[in-house]
Amino acid sequence: MSKKLLLKDAHIEGIRYFDVYRKQGGYNAVEKALKMTPEEILEEVKTSGLRGRGGAGFPTGMKWSFLAKPEGVPRHLVVNADESEPGTFKDRYLMEYIPHLLIEGMIISSFCLGSNASYIYIRGEYSWIPDILEQAIEEAKQAGFLGKNILGTGFDLEIYVQRGAGAYICGEETALLESLEGRRGNPRLKPPFPAVKGLWERPTVVNNVESIAAVVPIINITGAEYAKIGVGRSTGTKLISACGNINKPGVYEIDMTITVEEFIYSDEYCGGIPNGKRLKACIPGGSSVPIVPANLLLRTINGEPRYMNYESLADGGFATGTMMGSGGFIVLDEDQSIVEHTMTLARFYAHESCGQCTPCREGTPWMYKILKKIHSGQGTMEDIDLLWDIQRKIEGNTICPLGDAAAWPVAAAIRHFRDEFEWYVKNPELSQKQNYGLANY
Ligand code: L3W
Ligand code: SF4
């Protein structure tokens, strides 16, 4: 059984409210941290090995140590709660059920970074969650954990909740900052990174909800103890939101030592595939990461079991492996059509492109158009090659990672399932009536 750090109290009735959360030891980490120096907290986070839980897996302690500290310039912490990656809903779970964990993590992190005004930027579609967060903020304030002179330490902190308007691109950190400043969410060129020039050109740390929540157990148990959980550079626990063709969709906290096979088939997690169907493929890290066929998902190229952690999922590079990403685990059974699935994703990315870069603005709708043509039985073999060519021209040639995110699913689908694309071309009448999955798998 995986160790629980973030969700250990999630089952307790009323844990959303301050009194219940406090009774379970909530805000003890704030009391402990405010007796430490910011440098000591930073050391704990570095020692923990915590890596960003939003998708990139960048070491959190390292990001914090990059924060510029020019004399007299305010600094900010911004929590990225714009969880829009298809298949990803673990931050929603945290904010909805245990909002105080995020607020507690923000107080500690803000103290460490020297932020007196910190922000939660939340996606517009999570319309009911800002009220939950604002209530938690108010409760924490009433109890003296927020506002002026917190616990008599002289540290002041206000936390503001800002709603997005429902644009995927605003989850990209610089687009998020643009939106927070009141402009259209267009990504900025990096460098400068937000740690140097972020919100209102001030040094800013942007971290995912889960990353900031993880700071609470790190302070409670120490960074060294946190680092003992997990394996290699995949320390601590990770929330996985599992969906698709599984018996038990939901949010699971894993300690990154379990195999992918165990995660899919054991009753503790996904509980297997409904109706005894076979596993066809999986996208383990949210829609942007490469899709992997079952054989490569369960075993690496060397025949070793694949594990649910950053290194093992990426083992074999893009040609064979995939990525941990945001932990949005999407399972596809034998009846699913990869062409249809890829087309749906292509439509999403084409719709969400902000339009600043030509390869992304022009390439994403073009890929969708070709996929639609192939899916409807009107495609040609040349269309498959053209699709491959377009995705290659997008990857690496754009301002922000949305371009790559749109290219990778197409690349991986063609790489691993080219025969399926060809089936759609060779069987135009059949492709109108049934999916390749049903006909041939
Ligand atoms: C200062 C340097 N800071 C890097 C910081 C940087 C950022 C973090 C990671 O994209 C990925 C993307 C999605 N000085 C720095 C530095 N940083 N070098 O480190 O940066 P980066 O560029 O590796 O990634 P990113 O731009 O943050 C994130 C993928 O995650 N993804 C996620 C999608 C959506 C969600 C969601 O809905 N929750 O996560 C899924 O795979 O495609 O590749 O903070 O500033 N020298
Ligand atoms: Fe906008 Fe796409 Fe360029 Fe990102 S890659 S800045 S979404 S056009």
Image (cartoon, helix red, strand yellow):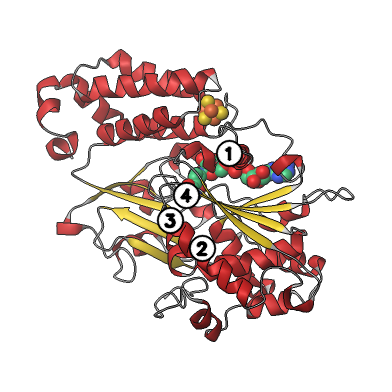
In the picture, the disc for residue 305 is none
Q: Are marks 2 and 1 in contact (CB under 8 Å)?
A: no
Q: Are marks 4 and 3 in contact (CB under 8 Å)?
A: no
Of the numbered discs 4 and 1, the one sitting upstream in the chain is 4
- Amino acid type shown at disc 4: Glu
- Amino acid type shown at disc 3: Arg
- Amino acid type shown at disc 1: Ser
SS type, badge 1: helix
Rounded to the nearest angstrom, the CA distance separating label 2 from label 1 is: 20 Å
Q: Residue furthest bottom?
A: 23
Rounded to the nearest angstrom, the CA distance separating label 4 from label 2 is: 15 Å
In the picture, the disc for residue 179 is 1
- Mark whose residue sits in front, 4 or 2: 2
- Mark whose residue sits in front, 3 or 1: 1
- Mark whose residue sits in front, 4 or 1: 1
Give the x, y percent position of residue 218.
64, 71
Give the labeled residue for mark 4: 83
Residue 156 sits above or below residue 288 on the image: below
Give the labeled residue for mark 2: 133
**Is disc 2 surrounded by few (<14), some (14 to 19) or many (20+) residues within 10 Å?**
many
Rounded to the nearest angstrom, the CA distance separating label 3 from label 1 is: 39 Å
Distance from mark 4 CB to nearest ligand 1 atom below 8 Å? yes
Image quadrant for the C terminus? top left
